[in-house]
Image: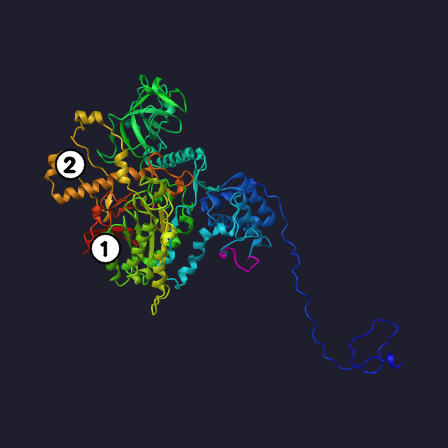
Amino acid sequence: MDSLRRPPDSNTFSSSPAFATPLHPLPSVTRAPPPPPPAFNAPAVSAVLPVLLPPPTLRPLAFRTFTKKHNLTLNALSLQALATFIGKHCGSGWREEGTGERVLDEAAKLWKAENGAVIVEDGPRLKAILATLESCMVGGKIGPTKTGRDLSRQNSFAFGKNDSAVDLNSGGIGQLALSRQSSIAQGQDAEEQDDASTDPRAWLKVVSAFEQPRLRYDMERKHFVQLTNTPSLFPPASNKTALLRERYNIIYQRLLRNEAFQAPTFSTNMPSLTRSDSTTAQQFYKITPIANLLGRGGSTHLLLGMLVIAPTGTLALNDLSGSISLDLQHAQPLQGVDSAFFVPGMIVLVDGVYEEDWSGVGSSGLGSTGGVGGTIGGRFLGFSIGGPPVEKRDVSLGINLSAGDVGGGGGWTDFLGLGSERAVGGRMRRLEQRLLGPESLHASESRRKTAILSEVALDQPSTLVALRTVLEQYAARPDPPLSFILTGNFCSHAVMAGAGTGSIEYKELFNELASVLSDFPSLLRSSTWIFVPGDNDPWSSAFSAGASVTLPRSGVPDIFTSRIRRAFTSAKSEVGIRHREGEMDGEAIWTSNPTRVSLFGPAHELLVMRDDISGRFRRSAIRIGQAIDSSGDLGPSGRQDAAIDIDSDNDTPMMTGALPSTEQELAALPAVLQADSFTTASAKKTILSLLPQATLSPFPFSIRPVNWDRASSALSLHPLPHTLVLADAEADAYVLTFEGCHVLNPGRLVPGGAGSRKGGKVQWVEYDCWTKRGTVMEGWSG
């Protein structure tokens, strides 16, 4: 029976009915509270009853949210996807409780934050956004995410298991794809509140031509789309045609936004079948396709096309519809006499008369097909010729428009991979004001400067003397400049092309440059150095022998610049040298030609191009107006006015009167005024020839070859950058502003290219990153 006794310390009771409750009192035992049950995530029971929401019912609310509030457009498929999502997750209260409008608003914000197009299409991007919203839906409303963060403060999204991989071919959006734009957007609010980074160089990004996003203008959708195919060094021939067609479409849609080419909404003229023989009677200009000239002989038209040399050797004009022989013997430039160059490869406006009954090459000779897509019979007699009007940057992006302006749809396009203007532009400008503004405590006046030096030919002894003179001036200032931009050619002869300069000699040139830079460690520690190559620098010069190389071209190889990188490392490792709080280390960046320098994202874009473009314009230009020159008829006034809207660096007109028409008038001017007028007129002529073309290379590919897969974005001038650096060694230094684009040319570092070891004149451009204006600096080296 002892074995049946329950131990006194036992707390376990049997549930069997054969055992009764013991008679002796139970010991008092204090029981611990039972442990909580293990936590597990039970499937949440949805409290929302899904409904079938027809897209037409949601269309008014979607239009008010996407179009009126966010300037976006929904197509039928995307509206169907949003209606299905709202009906499933918001239920019958999507209208009364306002949950549907909240979902649409957040979807539009996420679409714009991911740099989506103006037209919202149903695809991987929209599905990824709806998947993110689905994870935030709680009881039919948008709540915090699974990580406890609110959707409006969510900075990045992981749409796949592998965040480091982006499926560009399928159009999927991953964390890496969003990192380009969201890297700036994520840090905006944090940077505005956190003063840890007070160095403006933290927002200075050098975007190489090979790192720039490749975009293509879609004429049907009226916006840019990103190319997903891999660029090739030997692209198919169809890419060449696509490149020229895209150039034409960009200029054409830009031209249609000009108020001079917009048809009035209301017209007081009664419709009539009478043909008008002059465009001056019209209230607006209208572009006529070349194919539409057939059967309209003797009528006046305005054509937009590309100047080309026909297979027969005559001048012709091409557009997307056909080609026609062009006669410019009686033509005059629209901006005035000798105001711009006209070379084959440029897209121009020609106003004149179509002559159908002309027995010539275009009518019955080689290449005549007499139909659309070929050479149109007859010729076009041009009376006026000029480049298409230039569009300001704000108009191209569709921001800060004045009354009557029609802006483009590029505001949401991320042209540099650093964020679009509408997504991060406003916040970046506020950050620029805080770090670079006049009242900034982080950047002095000298810290806002950038020194731009061109044609730094290291094989010339006077170049190193001149470079030392420039660096001594900046080293003596209390604060070093923000950056230095040095452009080639770094050798006056083509390297490794039989000119006596091989790879070993070329490396020695940069070793000598490193020895000069080592004497200024303060500049190496606190400034960003950007090196842009020229046509004589390797490796392109090895097979070009000094001729024009293919654009864009890569930077100087690292094998030649090891000593310069060592100089920067030595300057940073000096004992006892400490940076100020928030200041970054200096660095040397060897980038491509051309290259883009971005300061504070889209708020400041500086395009650097090393090319002797003025000399190429002079060599390739065609002659116009021979018949007028021989007769001496310049119009009623006897001269042509120089009506060129180009300002100098102080935003005042440099040329207010007319150009001298005779040699006697030119000789009567003071010597200083003659020199200034010649330099300014030459600079204006180059600018008026280049900027209207929307590309940095408006030449035939036989004169200036380009990479067909990269030229559309790397050489694009649409939209116009804030500052364009045309490093032209064949032209004098100048700084001018045209249509909001500040164009500057540093000229040669040593004017005249003197090779003596003694000193001489030194010139460069000092650029103010806050005012976005440059100043030509001159000095003398001893």
Count of marks placed on residues: 2
For label 2, the SS is: loop
When the figure is inspected, residue 346 is found, relative to residue 26, above or below; the finding is above
Instruction: Measure the alpha-carbon separation of dots 1 and 2.
Output: 40 Å
Residue 345: horizontal and vertical position, in percent?
Answer: 33, 33
| Residue carrying label 2 | 660
Question: Which three-letter amino acid code belongs to the residue tagged 2?
Answer: Pro
Residue 458: horizontal and vertical position, in percent?
Answer: 28, 51
Q: Is residue 24 left or right of residue 207?
A: right
Could you tell me which quadrant the C terminus lies in? bottom left
Q: Nearer the viewer, mark 1 or mark 2?
A: 1
Between residues 325 and 17, which one lies in front from this camera angle?
325
When the figure is inspected, residue 474 is found, relative to residue 54, above or below; the finding is below
Residue 220: horizontal and vertical position, in percent?
Answer: 45, 35
Label annotation for residue 120: none
Question: Which three-letter amino acid code belongs to the residue tagged 1?
Answer: Val
* Residues rendered magenta in the picture: 144-153
When the figure is inspected, residue 144 is found, relative to residue 29, above or below; the finding is above
| Residue carrying label 1 | 465
Q: How is the image coloured?
A: rainbow
